[in-house]
Structures are given as C-alpha cells and as structure tokens.
Image (cartoon, rainbow, N blue to C red):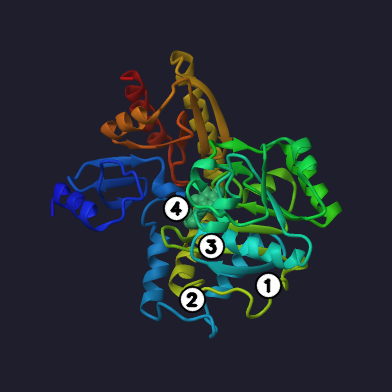
Amino acid sequence: MNFDEIKHMYDDFVLSTYTRQDLCLVAGRGIWVEDINGKKYLDFFPGWAVSGIGHCHPEVISEMKGQMERILHVSNNFYSDVQPVLAKKIIEYSFPGKVFFANSGAEANEGAIKLARRYGKPGRYEIITMEKSFHGRTLATLTATGQEKIKKGFSPLVEGFKHVPFNDIDALKNALTEKTVAIMLEPIQGEGGINVADLGYMKAISAMCREKDILLIVDEVQTGMGRTGKMFAYSHFGIEPDIMTLAKALGGGMPIGALVVNNKHKDVLSAGTHATTFGGSPIVCSAALGVFRAIEEEGLLDNTIKMGKYLVQKVEDLKKSNPMIKGIKGKGLMIGVELDIEDASAITEECVKEGLLINCTQKNILRVMPPMTVKKEDIDVAIDKLTRALGRI
Ligand SMILES: *Cc1c(COP(=O)(O)O)cnc(C)c1O
C-alpha cells in the first residue's frame, strides 16, 4: 500500500476523531523514526511522550520477548509473577503504598476519582482541579479537565468538579467547601502549555490537604518516569501526594496506566470495588520493567537533567537572534518554547519538512520532549533544523 491508499482507508474505515499530520510512520529506533517513503525524522515528541526512553528501546524489547514466550495475559483473578514486581518498583521510587494497574492515563485518573468518591462518602465528593489542566477523555476525566473545548457537546457532565486558576493559592482556598474531598493537579501542566507549579504553591496545597483531610492527587501521566529529571515530578517540590497516576512513558510504548495510593488510603478501594480486564497484564508489565531497567542502567535521570540544561541553553542562544521566541519554561526534558505568534502550527509543519518532529500546544507553545536518551549531537541537529524552520515563517 502506498500513502495515498492508506489515507483513503482511514477516510473510509477509521473514525475521524483525530487531526493527523501528513506522515505515516512505519519504523522507529531510539530518537529516530522513519516514514513510509523512507524519510527519517529526529523525534523530539516521541509518541506524545509515550516513548520516553526512545522508540523500541532494547531493554523493553528484550523484557517483552522473554515474556512473550511464557504468557501474554493473565486475568486478575489469578496471581502473576510479573505484576507485583512492577508494583514494588514503582513504590520504591515513590512512597509507601500500593498500586492498581489500568491501561491508560484516563483510566488511572478515573480510578483516582472513584477512590476519592468512596473516601468522602457520603457527604464529601467535590474534586477541585485546575484551569488548563488535562486529565483524559472519559466522561469523568473530561469533566475534571479544565478546558472547555474538551467538554463541549457531552453534557450532562459528571457532578462534583470545580476548576480554579493554576498557581493561585487564594483561588484554591476560596473554592474549598465542606464537600471538598480531593485536589487534583499536574505538577507541570503538559497540554496546558508546560506550566510549572510554583514551589510555595505546591507546599501550601500539600499542607492544606493534610490539615483538612483532603486527598492530594497528582497526575503524573505526562511528567512521570523521569521526564523532569526525577522519576516523579512531585519530588521536585518536597511534598508527597496521597495518590499519583501514571501512564504514557511507563510502558515504553505499551499501553499501561497506574494508580498509586499511599498506605493511609490503600484500603479505600477494597475487593470488588474497582477492576479492569487487561490491567497489569504480564506483557505490558514486563515492558515497564524494561523501562525502569533502562533508566537505571543508562543513568537516564542524570542525562535528562544534563541534556535539559543543554537544550534550554541552546534555545536561549537562538532566542537572542530570533524575536519570535518569547520565553522558555519547563523542567528536565519537558520544555515549552513560548512564541510570539498566533498559531505555531505552521512551525511544526516546517519542522516536519526539515525532518524534526515536535509538538505545538495552546496554539503558541512549542512542546519539546525528546527521549531521555538524547545526546548533545542530537540536540545540535534539532536546533539547526528548528532554526531553519523558524527562518521560513
Ligand atoms: C495524556 C494525559 C492523560 C490521559 O492519558 P490517556 O492515556 O490518553 O488516557 C491524563 N493526564 C495527563 C496529564 C496527560 O498528559
């Protein structure tokens, strides 16, 4: 099949819920992907942050190959010898508690919302989330999401959600009622435009939650698994949440989500209250174990911090000669480049022509999130490509 035939098949048989870039990707290794015509691209937004350690990482592949020869799926009414090993790994890097495995970010967040409802019953059910947040596309998680465009047309929405401006502690305090059971936020808003929570803000929320017995839920679906230079981004802030959700990079390309619950709340979702057929299957858990191994053995947290600094320095240099760049924000290798332009999608298009994949969010923020395995040479090449792309705008 050639690309035109493929596009026709999409038109005929695949629901048109996505706006796609005009590219058909057929192969990927590390930081590079290849399209159907054999053209190669440097991938600085690998799989929407899913391929956080690069495409087809050898550790992920080898873990999965071993597991494939044994068993692919074990239902959750049996024990498996892989699932608890991954749960233990996640707990060792976060806080004492337990893990529930889901299949996506939305599902992990849905679990967090259900847990909050059960914890607060009967009188407390309200969950406060942030404007510009993103928590998923299921009915409850799109209600939790603080962006109108995501909710449009899906009323009636789930009851009991409120949004307040991000990084505004007074707005949050004013929104609290005796019905408030949880506060849910991303430590760094991804879809919202790479907005980093202030240190004092996170500390104040954490203290307030402790004092009022409100659950602190951090959505680390995008920030988790080392992306910001720490395994989980909340630890930049010297706080510990009650609940953390993970997905995207956790499976190294495989679909997996996780709901991580601290010891105090580990029994709220008791037997029979929550379940999913595919959750925590051995094959996806083995992939996630490969991700942890790669991060540990290749020192990828360290590399993320170093390369993050290098990348920011390079963009700062570019900013000096390019007035279109207004600002740079983010942490580790989760970087947003703010542009003085109404709609930056033309720039991502020009980057594609140059052979560079990046993302644009909130219309004017370039989102740059290369694999944590990225090297200086890759960054130099990407900056050259970006410079040429910007020059044509
Ligand atoms: C992507 C994302 C989600 C949703 O994850 P899905 O796997 O697409 O359901 C939730 N929260 C954040 C912060 C995300 O970036």
> Which residue bears the numbered disc 4?
50
Q: Is residue 299 above or below residue 123?
A: above
Q: Secondary structure at mark 2?
A: loop
Query: Can you give x and y, in whole percent of width and height, for residue 274 in the image?
Result: 60, 73
Tell me the mark number nearer the camera, choosing from 4 and 1.
1
For the residue carrying disc 1, how many other residues have a C-alpha within 10 Å: few (<14), some (14-19), or many (20+)? some
> Which amino acid, mark 1?
Leu
Q: Is residue 203 visible?
A: no
Along the horizontal axis of the image, is 288 left or right of 34? right
Dot placed on the residue nearer the N-terminal end, 3 or 4: 4
> Which residue bears the numbered disc 3?
107
The numbered disc on residue 51 is none
Tell me how far mark 2 sits from mark 4, CA to CA: 22 Å
> Which amino acid, mark 2?
Thr
Tell me how far mark 2 sits from mark 3, CA to CA: 12 Å
Dot placed on the residue nearer the N-terminal end, 4 or 1: 4
> Which amino acid, mark 3?
Glu
Residue displayed at 75% across by 66% down: 119
Tell me how far mark 3 sits from mark 4, CA to CA: 16 Å
Q: Quadrant of residue 96?
A: bottom right
Tell me how far mark 3 sits from mark 1, CA to CA: 15 Å
Residue displayed at 19% across by 55% down: 9
Is ligand 1 within 8 Å of the beta carbon of the residue shown at mark 3?
yes
For the residue carrying disc 2, how many other residues have a C-alpha within 10 Å: few (<14), some (14-19), or many (20+)? few
Q: Is residue 306 visible?
A: yes
